Amino acid sequence: MTETEGNVNVGGMYSKFWRISLVIIAMLLLFVGPTYVPYAMFKLNIDYVATVGVGAALFIVGIAFTLYLVQKKIITA
């Protein structure tokens, strides 16, 4: 194992490919999750409350994942 900026590199999480992939996943959860997933569910005649709940859950997961990436210094300023 190698160390990068004081963090232990596990499974190549600090490689450029994984950093970009994790940021893209976080942004998809934040922006696409609360908009297009509930819209698609609504178009499939799924209950409105369920679509709003799924959208809110995806938004919260996206925020939590983004905060995790910031804490692990995957996303830096």
Image (cartoon, helix red, strand yellow):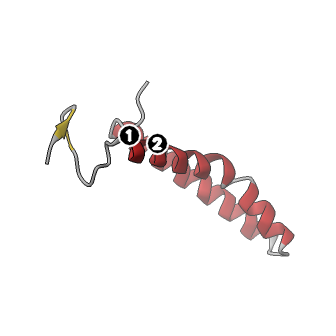
Q: Residue extending furthest front?
A: 17
**Is 59 rendered above or below residue 71?**
below
Question: Residue 68: x and y, percent?
Answer: 40, 45
Q: Residue 56: x and y, percent?
A: 65, 56
Circles 1 and 2: CB atoms closer than 8 Å: yes
Residue 24 x, y percent position in the rendering: 54, 46
Which labelled disc corresponds to residue 20? 2
Q: Nearer the viewer, residue 71 or 18?
A: 18
Residue at 41% x, 45% y is 17
Which residue in the structure is indicated by mark 1? Answer: 16
Rendered position, 36 above or below 23: below
Give left or right: position of 68 versus 62. Answer: left
The answer to whether 71 is drawn above or below residue 48 in the figure is above
In which quadrant will I find the C terminus?
top left
Local packing at callout 2 (Cα closer than 10 Å; few below 14, some 14-19, many 20+) is some
Q: Amino acid type of disc 2?
A: Ile
Q: Secondary structure at mark 2?
A: helix
Q: Amino acid at mark 1?
A: Lys
Q: Residues within 10 Å of mark 1 (few under 14, many from 20)?
A: few
- Residue 10 or 67: which is nearer the viewer? 10
Between the residue at mark 1 and the residue at mark 2, the CA separation in whole angstroms equals 6 Å
Identify the residue at horizontal 68%, vertical 63% (top origin). Answer: 53
